[in-house]
Amino acid sequence: MSIHESTRTTADTSDTGAAPTQHVWPTLQARDARALVAFLTDVVGFAATAVMAGEDRDVAHAQLDWPHGGAIMLGSHSPEREWSREPGTCGTYVVVPDDEIEALDARLREHAPAAGGRVVVPLRDTDYGSRELVLQDPEGNLWSFGTYRGEPRR
């Protein structure tokens, strides 16, 4: 898939084309949005659902879905726009199934450095029962990956 293509088409009428039910979308901007999309998909494991170019910027909008639920939105840094975030200031927690956290850790330690990222906190057990690691992406954003799924709603 090209960096500026979407996996959805206007002719897609299948149920898989339905809008996601997620209601909270972490959002960030990047100095090199194309490279960040590539890092987050090729190295980390997000799926690029939509990546759209803008007239005045490299990536006007990208939606990257996490295979186990949830997603983020990102675009090229545009300090002159009313919605602007300084690149490298985002921190996001991502839930990983128990049986996949070690494989993710190994993949990130092996591939992130060559792609400009680094594991800043190695995989460890926490006091609250999670197994977590922290990755810094090439833009400086921090991604905490862990097995803690949150507490049930009351």
Image: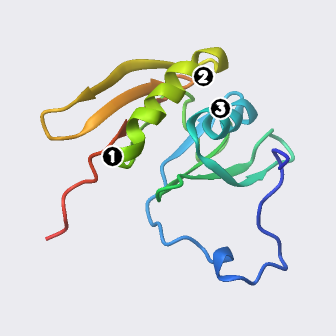
**10 Å crowding of disc 1: few (<14), some (14-19), many (20+):** few
Element at label 1: helix
Query: Closer to the N terminus: mark 3 or mark 1?
Result: 3
Percent across and percent down for residue 82 are 61, 47
Mark 2 vs mark 1, CA separation in Å: 21 Å
State whether residue 36 appears in this view. Answer: yes
- The residue indicated by pointer 3 is 39
Percent across and percent down for residue 131 are 27, 36
- The residue indicated by pointer 1 is 98
- Front: mark 3 or 1: 1
The amino acid beneath tag 2 is His
State whether residue 95 appears in this view. Answer: no
Element at label 2: helix
Q: For the residues labelled 2 and 1, say whether their Cβ atoms are less than 8 Å apart.
A: no
Q: Nearer the viewer, residue 118 or 62?
A: 118
Q: Identify the residue shown where x is 83% and y is 76%.
A: 10
Query: Closer to the N terminus: mark 3 or mark 2?
Result: 3
